[in-house]
Image (cartoon, rainbow, N blue to C red):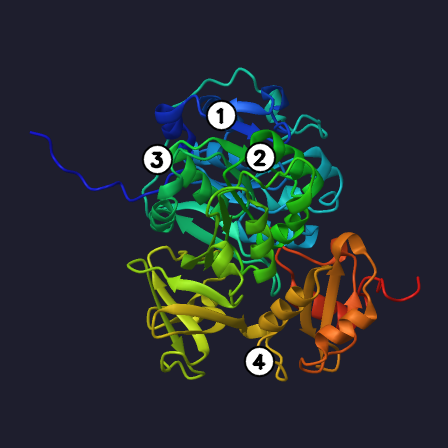
Amino acid sequence: MSRFTLPEKAFYLGLLWERAAARHGDVPVTLDQPLATLPDAGTDLTYRQVADLVDDLAARLWQVGIRPTERVAVHKDDNFDIALLACAAARIGAVPVVLSAALSAEVVAKLLERLDEPWLISDAHKLGGPLKDLPLAHLVRETVLAGTAPHGSLRLLADLTDAPRRPAVRLHRRQTALITHSSGTTGVNKLMVHNARALFHRLLPQQLIAWPVRGKETVALCMSYVHSRFYHSLGVFLNYGNPLVVLTDPDPDVVGPVFTRTRPGLVETHPNNFIQWEDLADAPGAPLSSVRYYSSTFDAIHPRTIQRLLAASRRRRPLLVQLYGQSETGPISGAWYTRKSAAKNDGRDVGFVLPGFIKLRVVDEDGRPVRRGRPGHLELRGRGTIMTYLGEDERYQRQQHDGWWRLGDMGSVSRGGRLRLLDREIDQIDTIDSNLELEDVLMSRLDELLEVIIVPGASGQPVPVVCTRRDAPLDPERWRAATADLPSLAPPLHWPFGDVPRTSTWKVRRVEISRMLHEGDAPRNLNSPA
């Protein structure tokens, strides 16, 4: 007689591709560029071939000397091999620590110090450039090379072609399984410790939400390889057997031809990349015409962007699905928009709190719950919360209040359970109810804007930093008309889009912008003479 067993309730990165290949081995995986470490594999692969690459890389890491529970920091130039190296490290029971290629050398040194002599996987470009002055011999146990270019006498993974394959190692579901870092929008990045159990509880609601897409649509992912969300997206769509397109470069000029060739039915990227992709709405070949579902996480998305993306699709009833969450907690709330509802969208409304998975409350300055609909500090209870901040447990504990996790966001929850965001606590300006809401208004009124960020200036006044499409001039008359009925703002600073400090998920680093304004080292204002 067969016995009913409960699900494993653990999400193991090391088994992710192997299990997908066993069920959907011939499903295609298309890359926008070859793997940096194994370029001969090409860009047109299958689940089975990627699973074999992960197994191969795991064998090479074992041969180097990496063993279970040891920390393996992966910090190299952006490429899909970051994710494969992370899965390979997890496959031999090691703990992958994924560090963004965009981190400064100073921050990398601080994070490596917190990791207490981890292994480091990097490449010749990083080691010979940004990291060349770091005392790596004192910070890491050993450095091994990804990519194909040599660097000194370091061992190159690409050369270890005879490493024997090994069975997968699976740690206990409550042991550390993955370490990622926070976005760094408020200072030095925090190292977030995840276990397989918490990762599973984040994965489950995302699998349920994606049920209509199972196996039917080609899924295109253009996301940070160092964020846990990317691995959950893989977990969802590999389980369902969807063909995958994985992009490293978010430039619309790169993305457009790839989408025209692969015709994805679902695309996911960061909200600020979606803003760039508005240019694809009228691009040659109609690259967005096949998209039935847009998936947006990490941050709220501007209403104008939602409307343009949905209008570019030629599918019946296209949807944009938005999840709001944080790196420490996973998804918190969700909403979806149609062409009709997008026109009425309030950009601060991030949908319903996920029932059965998340408990959310709003409290005042003293930690007392406020009435429904009243604004306050957001606090959460959920099974997907991280274990701690590595090396900063006191900081982690300060955000715990009687079992509730302080999100650091201000907002309100309606009687019907809809969550409305106002601002980050640290970003509030006394003269403005919500910076984010004001930014949404400006984006909707000025089509030429690619980004607008309102931050406190040197004397506390709200300063709008704006970016335009392809850095085109900003018309001062249009700006005056758009801001005539808004709270008083300082004259806009027109910055090149590429000069705005951002995180690995393309979030704007508001605190860094404020520092630049205070210290006078901001980029050249394009509205001023050179």
Which numbered disc covers residue 28?
Answer: 1
Residue drawn at point x = 58 percent, y = 73 percent: 426
Q: Nearer the viewer, mark 4 or mark 3?
A: 4
Calculate the distance from the C-alpha at mark 1 to the C-alpha at mark 3: 27 Å
- Circles 1 and 3: CB atoms closer than 8 Å: no
* Quarter of the view holding residue 171: top left
Residue 261 against residue 436 in the figure, above or below = above
Q: Residues within 10 Å of mark 2 (few under 14, many from 20)?
A: many
* Mark with earlier residue (1, 3): 1
Residue placed at 73% from the left, 45% from the top? 130
- The reply to whether dot 1 and dot 4 touch (C-beta < 8 Å) is no
Tell me which label, 2 or 3, sits earlier in the chain: 2
Q: Quadrant of the N terminus?
A: top left
**First in sequence: mark 2 vs mark 1:** 1
Q: CA distance from mark 1 to mark 4?
A: 48 Å
For residue 80, the mark is 2
